[in-house]
Image (cartoon, helix red, strand yellow):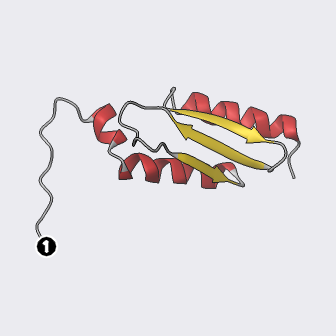
């Protein structure tokens, strides 16, 4: 079990690693990490992720980034989108 100070440092590191795309907090009462998306293409209703460990938090953040087109917005601008195969 990590202390609250260690968990806060982990949250700060994950937020730094994501370069301003997320606000990441440690909830001492909930004992969970919380991430709030703050990129320009975030859905109107917002995106909040809750996870008990940083590995789960990070993988959920990547999943949500892909699901909502953030990775394309951030890294794919100026490129021709790859057409999806029709099923």
Give residue 51's quadrant in the image.
Answer: bottom right
Q: Say which residue appears at 45% left-offset and 53% top-offset.
A: 63
- Residue 26 in the image: x percent, y percent? 75, 40
Q: Say which residue appears at 50% left-offset and 45% top-offset.
A: 47
Q: How many labels does the image show?
A: 1
Q: Say which residue appears at 45% left-offset and 50% top-offset.
A: 64
Most distant residue in the bottom direction:
87
Image quarter hosting the C terminus = bottom left
Q: In this view, does 59 lie above or below 46?
A: below
- Residue 77 in the image: x percent, y percent? 22, 31
Is 41 left or right of 53, judged from the image as shown? left
- Residue 2 in the image: x percent, y percent? 85, 47
The residue pinned by badge 1 equals: 87
- Residue 5 in the image: x percent, y percent? 85, 34
Q: Say which residue appears at 40% left-offset and 39% top-offset.
A: 42
Instruction: Look at the numbered disc 1 and give the secondary structure of its residue.
Output: loop
Is 35 left or right of 63, judged from the image as shown? right
> Dot 1: within a 10 Å radius of its alpha carbon, few (fewer than 14), some, or many (20 or more) residues?
few
Give residue 11's quadrant in the image.
Answer: top right
Residue situated in front as seen by the camera: 76 or 22: 22
Is 43 left or right of 27, judged from the image as shown? left
Is 13 left or right of 6, judged from the image as shown? left
């Amino acid at each position: 079990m990590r202390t609250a100070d260690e968990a806060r440092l982990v949250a700060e590191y994950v937020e730094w690693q994501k370069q301003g795309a997320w606000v990441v907090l440690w909830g001492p009462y909930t004992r969970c990490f919380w991430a709030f998306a703050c990129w320009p293409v975030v859905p109107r209703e917002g995106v909040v992720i809750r996870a008990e460990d940083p590995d789960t938090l990070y993988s959920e953040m990547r999943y949500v980034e892909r699901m909502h087109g953030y990775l394309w917005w951030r890294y794919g601008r100026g490129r021709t989108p790859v057409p999806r195969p029709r099923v």
